[in-house]
Image (tube, rainbow, N blue to C red):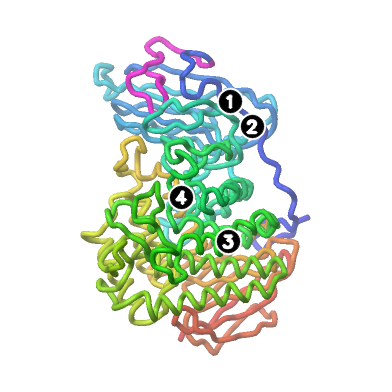
């Protein structure tokens, strides 16, 4: 069933179950079995001198006409991304995909002597189609002696994301950024059932075995065969926007299942892509594994967010709820010994003993840290929402009360001063610490632990100043938090500035050499996706209760943005903002949705497209907003316009 929009396009009104692509595999994707599965031209072969992972790679000498290729026959219908790590000694190399002899996609091989990731996106196949994957060497500037060799390793097939949201805008850079980010993010998704290595890391480049991978995506270093709690938490919403609900369930569920009493209710820090085996570089035993206090709390928060996006009862069923309950009760009780105050602690003895902060580079022995405190606060709010969804309003009220009490203690007893002098951690000796703490600085306003007002404003100014100057993190994945921090506090200009920074530096080399480029760190792409939708568009769904809230965060200079096919609960919404005064929402679900369109300022003249509405004025994050409530039936488009203040 569908209905036609005014522009003639159709919007689905059904929540049909998503059917993933058929299983497909590349033979010998890392060239560890020599020449097996591939066709080799003269001047090509298997080498061992420059692998990305493992011990072997394909080597193509310089000169025209040198190719390595493989034909894969489709077992059924599906759309796929094809990726590979490629290095080259000059220009002219190519990575091509053909289907039944016809071109299906091509990317030029970058002129880089180190490995970076290349992807041909959304290759559509039907059963019996022959997909040819080809790598061709370059001829440099026309002279084969110029050294335009090509090295190839770690070929990967990904299922094209179930959702394909589209951005149009008056700002071309945003359109370009979003298109790059969603394609890049999707290229990190594993096709379930693919057999791959386990426990790959810099010390064991070939791993310690193999297993079938579960539905999952890369969240962490690309030279390790697993996903990490911290990275996963920051990528969950971007993954939901791409329709990766099954992958999120698998990954969040694996962390939840590992947070047992034997681990002192810490989730294991990293899993192999089979979603069962702990990544060995981070796990030595039940008493020695990487653990950082913010992680269990962030996973609770992200479980609640995934529930609002998907409406999946998995997140409120007993198994997941047990994790949320333990993380917000027993975990806090067991880790509140050195400075008993209801705030979960680290040991001050390093990441294998339990770190209070995500900031691993500070060299400080911390017992309590601002990022853990802030994450604990958000976990209480998330647990309250999940308890309410389970029908336990008494428990929901208790968690809401804990959150409020924790925030009061933060402002009245834990934190002091403002700006650079504001408390952001406590040392093992009990001394308060101020100054720049990276994560234990910016998490406090990002999680809205800080109350709106002068202290919060001064600290946001300090964060922006430090991140632009002497305190700028070396690793791009830390900087990906800054847009979230500023969007959360209605600092839209600064948030957009940091989105641009992350995108503009995607082709810089990552400080970890095996990682390739900044843009080859998965967190970069996933967070740009979520920051466009949740950040710039202020799109906040509540699928279980058929509600959606929006608030334009478009900074001056971006006149309008439209994002089509934002997935919520298996269906879709289209949303457009014109500045911060006009919003348009199309409901592509089969359910009537309540839409609250929020606008900064106190507006008394409200116009809709003739449908009934109610207005309320609310103070959100310290600023007055006009909130317009309308009902949007299936297949219909609603417009809300407010007069400028």
**Of the image marks 4 and 3, the number of the one nearer the N terminus:** 4
Residue 125 circle label: 2
- Examine the residues drawn in magenta and state their main secondary structure: loop
**Of the image marks 4 and 1, the number of the one nearer the N terminus:** 1
The answer to whether residue 274 shows anywhere in this view is yes
- Mark 2–mark 4 Cα distance, whole angstroms, equals 32 Å
Q: Secondary structure at mark 2?
A: strand
Residue at image location 54% in from the left, 16% down from the top: 37
Q: Is residue 345 magenta?
A: no
In the image, taking residue 468 as reference, residue 261 lies left or right, namely right
- Mark 3–mark 2 Cα distance, whole angstroms, equals 34 Å
Between 284 and 637, the residue placed more toward the observer is: 284
The quarter of the picture where the N terminus appears is bottom right
In the image, is residue 454 above or below residue 223?
Answer: below
Asked which quadrant contains residue 346, the reply is bottom left
Q: Is residue 57 magenta?
A: yes
Asked which quadrant contains residue 507, the reply is top left
- Mark 2–mark 1 Cα distance, whole angstroms, equals 8 Å
Residue 231 circle label: 4
Crowding near the residue tagged with mark 4, few <14, some 14–19, many ≥20 C-alpha atoms within 10 Å:
some
- Mark 4–mark 3 Cα distance, whole angstroms, equals 15 Å
Q: Secondary structure at mark 1?
A: strand
Residue occupied by mark 3: 305
Range of residues picked out in magenta? 37-59
Residue 131 circle label: 1
Q: Secondary structure at mark 3?
A: helix
**Of the image marks 2 and 4, the number of the one nearer the N terminus:** 2
Residue at image location 58% in from the left, 25% down from the top: 131
Crowding near the residue tagged with mark 3, few <14, some 14–19, many ≥20 C-alpha atoms within 10 Å:
many
């Amino acid at each position: 069933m569908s209905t036609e929009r005014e522009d003639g396009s159709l919007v689905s009104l059904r929540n049909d179950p998503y059917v993933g692509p058929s299983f497909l595999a590349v033979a010998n994707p890392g060239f560890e079995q020599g020449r097996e599965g591939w066709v080799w031209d003269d001047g090509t072969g298997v080498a061992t001198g420059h692998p990305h992972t493992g011990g072997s790679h394909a080597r193509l000498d310089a000169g025209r006409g040198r190719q390595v290729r493989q034909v894969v026959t489709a077992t059924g219908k599906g759309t796929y991304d094809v990726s590979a790590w490629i290095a080259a000694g000059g220009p002219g190399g190519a990575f091509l995909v053909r289907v039944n002899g016809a071109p299906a996609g091509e990317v030029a091989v970058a002129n880089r002597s180190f490995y970076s990731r290349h992807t041909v996106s959304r290759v559509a196949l039907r059963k019996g189609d022959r997909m040819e994957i080809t790598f061709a060497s370059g001829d440099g500037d026309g002279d084969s002696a110029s050294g335009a060799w090509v090295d190839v390793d770690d070929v990967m097939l990904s299922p094209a994301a179930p959702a394909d949201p589209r951005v149009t805008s008056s700002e071309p850079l945003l359109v370009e950024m979003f298109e790059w980010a969603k394609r890049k993010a999707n290229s990190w998704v594993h096709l379930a059932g693919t057999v791959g290595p386990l426990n790959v890391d810099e010390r064991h480049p070939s791993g310690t075995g193999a297993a079938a991978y579960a539905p999952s995506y890369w969240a962490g270093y690309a030279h390790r065969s697993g996903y990490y709690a911290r990275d996963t938490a920051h990528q969950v919403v971007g993954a939901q926007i791409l329709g990766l609900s099954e992958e999120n369930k698998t990954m969040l569920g694996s962390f939840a299942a590992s947070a047992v009493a034997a681990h002192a209710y810490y989730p294991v820090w990293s899993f192999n892509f089979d979603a069962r085996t702990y990544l060995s570089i981070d796990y030595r035993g039940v008493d020695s594994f990487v653990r950082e206090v913010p992680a269990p709390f962030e996973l609770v928060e992200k479980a609640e967010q995934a529930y609002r996006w998907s409406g999946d009862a998995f997140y409120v069923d007993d198994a997941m709820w047990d994790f949320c309950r333990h993380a917000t009760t027993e975990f806090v009780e067991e880790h509140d010994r050195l400075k008993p105050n209801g705030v979960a602690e680290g040991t001050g003895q390093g990441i294998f003993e339990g770190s209070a902060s995500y900031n691993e580079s500070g060299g400080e022995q911390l017992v309590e840290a601002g990022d853990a405190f802030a994450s604990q606060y958000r976990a209480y709010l998330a647990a309250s929402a999940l308890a309410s969804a389970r029908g336990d309003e008494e428990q929901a009220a208790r968690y809401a009360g804990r959150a409020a009490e924790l925030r009061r203690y933060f402002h009245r007893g834990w934190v002091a001063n403002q700006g650079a002098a504001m408390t952001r951690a406590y040392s093992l000796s009990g001394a308060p610490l101020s100054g720049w703490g990276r994560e234990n600085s910016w998490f406090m306003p990002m999680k809205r632990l800080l109350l709106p007002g002068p202290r919060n404003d001064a600290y946001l100014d300090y964060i922006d100043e430090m991140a632009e100057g002497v305190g700028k993190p070396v690793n791009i994945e830390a900087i990906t938090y800054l847009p979230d921090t500023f969007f959360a506090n209605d600092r839209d200009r600064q948030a957009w500035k940091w989105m641009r920074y992350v995108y503009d530096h995607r082709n810089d080399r990552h400080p970890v050499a095996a990682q390739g480029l900044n843009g080859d760190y998965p967190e970069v792409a996933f967070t740009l996706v979520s920051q466009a939708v949740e950040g710039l568009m202020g799109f906040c769904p509540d699928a279980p209760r058929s509600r959606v809230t929006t608030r334009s965060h478009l900074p001056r200079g971006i006149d309008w943005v439209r994002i089509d096919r934002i997935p919520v609960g298996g269906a879709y919404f289209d949303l457009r903002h014109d500045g911060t005064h006009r919003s348009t929402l199309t409901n592509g679900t089969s359910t009537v949705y309540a839409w609250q369109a929020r606008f900064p300022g106190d507006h008394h003249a409200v116009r809709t497209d003739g449908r009934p509405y109610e207005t309320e004025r609310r103070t959100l994050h310290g600023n007055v907003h006009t909130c317009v409530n309308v009902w949007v039936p299936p297949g219909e488009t609603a417009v809300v316009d407010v007069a400028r203040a």
